[in-house]
Amino acid sequence: MTFAQNAQKISPSGVSWIDPEILNSHNKMGFQAGGSGIIWIGDLDPLTGLFVNSGTDLFIDNGATALTTSKNGPEFGISANGWSVFYNKPNAGTPQPWRAIINGTTVTKAPLTSGSVPRLSNLATKDTSATSIKLLYGKGPTLGNSEITWIDENNPTVEVVVDSVDEGVRWIDETQSFVYTKQTGINTGQLAIYNTNTSSETIITNDSDIKNYSYGWFAPEYNELLVMCIVNDSTLGIYKNNGNAFWDRIATLEAPPSAYPFRFFGSPEPFVANGKTFVSFVLKTVYTNSSYVDAEVWVMDLEPNINNRFMLRCDDGLPGTKRTDPESYIGTNEVFIYYNQINSLGEFEIWRYATGIST
């Protein structure tokens, strides 16, 4: 089986473009240029999934915190008033979340918080019915030693601390809620949904499996919210509210047999195309919190029956290659998957894969 006909490197040689993030509604990609810490936005062609111009169409800022510290590149946030870019950058020497408001080609940027305690790994709401954007981050000396904290961009001095950090916390699109693993013991926890409008938390699972990297989304197949997470490092669990005290796991997805020994999941992210849910992810030979290991990029749907499941490998097929953080872009005719591929020089390349999944 060959893959190269659909895989294409879209970043220039000799530089690192790290952690691409997609703003589907505006056909844009944001990323951070390697050692320079520059935040760029490029325009995407919805027909080809390629950059319309250079990929460096709009300069946002420089001096951003290195990804080895912040653990996340630029993130898009959306409200009824438009969209902004959020990223980490030192403020008086300490990494803090910054916001860049975009008006055409004019960029207005400023830090949202200050102080001696770092705030790391920003995540922003995408809720077109809300009047403001809310931001999640880890507050602490390192992301692994911090607390989940959220703020409203219109009142950023009021910080709400929720729990110990969970590397897989995610906002649920078109809501003011996020899903995460609430720690209940060493290396154990339960899925929980936190509503920032009511400052209330609901624990939705009670099984003993190890769960992390949670994600909630509205699934058209069920016409309601589902929650997904990595279960015991090597499967994806899909949970649904069936009216019980705790949500039921309605599917457990395993790695495609053809991927063996790549069977440990990383960076799972659902997306909806043509009324159906798909999940993009990487597969690794060992479970590790580090993203920078040999990995394959895959997409599958939620079909519980493995014999009927859509499964597609979405990279160039080169063995012994470090790949990480796949992102989906819903183009005019098909879905494109983007990911970082680390070459032999340690440079982060952005690759695009045309999946053929109809939109």
Image (cartoon, rainbow, N blue to C red):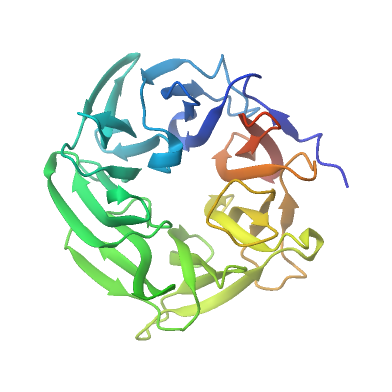
Residue 229 on image: x %, y % = 50, 65
Image-based side of 348 in relation to 223, left or right: right
Q: Is residue 335 left or right of residue 190?
A: right
Residue 231 sits above or below residue 119 on the image? below
The front one of 6 and 69 is 69
At which x and y percent is residue 244?
38, 86
| Residue at point 18%, 40% (across, down) | 116
Up-down: is 199 above or below 171? below
In the displayed structure, does residue 307 sit left or right of residue 24? right
Q: Is residue 138 visible?
A: no
Left/right of residue 345 with respect to residue 260 in the rendered view: left
Residue 195 drawn at (x, y percent): 24, 62
The vertical placement of 131 against 189, above or below, is: above
- Name which residue lies at 27% across and 54% down: 176
Figure quadrant of the C terminus? top right
306 w.r.t. 125: above or below: below
Image spot of residue 135 (x, y percent): 27, 45
**Closer to us: 197 or 237:** 237
Quarter of the image for residue 70 reads top left
Residue found at x 65% / y 67%: 303
The answer to whether residue 163 shows anywhere in this view is yes
